[in-house]
Amino acid sequence: MPRTVLTDIASQTWEHPADRAALSAMRALPGFDTAVNAFAKAFGERGVRHLFTASAVRVGPTQRPDLDALWTDVLATLDWPKRPELFVTSSPNINAGAVGFGEPFVVINSAAIEHLTREELRVILAHELGHVMSGHVTYRTIAQIILMVGIGNLPFLAGLALLPFQLAILEWYRKSELSCDRAALLGVQDPDLVLTTFMKLAGGREFGDSLDLEAFKAQSKEYEHDDSAWDTVLKAINTAFREHPFFTIRAGELQRWTADGSYAKVLAGEYVKRADVKRGDGLGDDLKRGASYYGDQAKAAVEKVSETIGRAKDAFTDAMKGAAR
């Protein structure tokens, strides 16, 4: 289908307030800048390229030319003039990543090419381009190294409080995914295509059977609206060390962004232009919205806990009354 070219679009257009708030909290950690500099010094640009592309194949006009043309089309839709290199690596996991310290590049796993359609691959590529355009790549590279190697096996971090650093960077890593899911939608301009891709990433392709997108949307709402206080605690524990948010959460977040009219406004030309962005513009507003986002979640969680405690108290009182009879 024809897509609207989003000329000079700035990443602030799609960045989720929780992404900006988590990034600010991460940067405020004692020793954070020291840790970032230690990673950059230990690995460097060439080291990162060796780490992520040693067994990968660079895509180009003669090497996977169809994928190369698709990458060109995604770059054109989001109007990004500086072309990051694209690599394919052999892996059974359906995934991709934007990595690097100075010159970002994108690596896509072969399983994605095997299991996803061409248009679903467009979703993946637009998502990764979103990370590049948002300037996420340095911090995401650090997070990926931590996930690959283990933070305890990195001697140059000796003396730092490692657990807060690890939790903070993974929290931001997950929230940055919410931003770039929006970039993916803007790159493909088909909400159901993005949600179908999420469904396949969560549960695999059809394999001769059939998939039901409406059932997946209902599942997403069911997960988000569970009113159990204990389940709220379990969700936090299950998520703390994850690389990505659950796909049901990502589906819900993207549907809200579409439903509130933000997506339609961007396609109509109402978006932030790169030429108009000044360093630090809107950061205060982003942090306020991020605080509101987290505050609303925390308030809902507290209300669930309070309600559950109240029920437990009533049940206990009733049981004691019964025992006294």
Image (tube, helix red, strand yellow):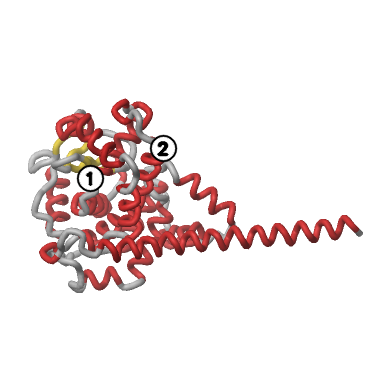
Q: Amino acid at mark 2?
A: Leu
Label disc, if present, on residue 163 of the rendered structure: 2
Compare residues 284 and 242 and report the one nearer the observer.
284
x and y, in percent, of residue 164 in the image: 40, 41
Q: Position of residue 247 (x, y in %)?
A: 40, 52
Q: Quadrant of residue 255?
A: bottom left
Label 2 Cα crowd, 10 Å radius (few <14 / some 14-19 / many 20+):
few
User: Where 206 falls versus 12 (above or below)?
Assistant: above
Question: Can the viewer see residue 94?
Answer: yes
Q: Residue at x 37, y 39 (%)?
A: 166
Q: Secondary structure at mark 1?
A: helix
Residue 172 shown left or right of residue 64 in the figure = right
* Residue closer to the observer: 211 or 301: 301
**Residue shown at 21%/60% (left/top)?**
280
For marks 1 and 2, give the CA distance: 21 Å
Q: Is the C terminus in the top left, top right, bottom left or bottom right quadrant?
A: bottom right
Q: Say what secondary structure mark 2 lies in.
A: helix
Question: Quick check: 236 above or below 79?
Answer: above
Report the label total: 2
Q: How many neighbours does mark 1 have within 10 angstroms: few (below 14), some (14-19), or many (20 or more)?
A: many
Residue 306, quarter of the rendered image: bottom right
When the figure is inspected, residue 258 is found, relative to residue 93, above or below; the finding is below
Residue at 14% of width from left, 54% of height from top? Answer: 75
Task: Name the residue tied to disc 1.
Answer: 137
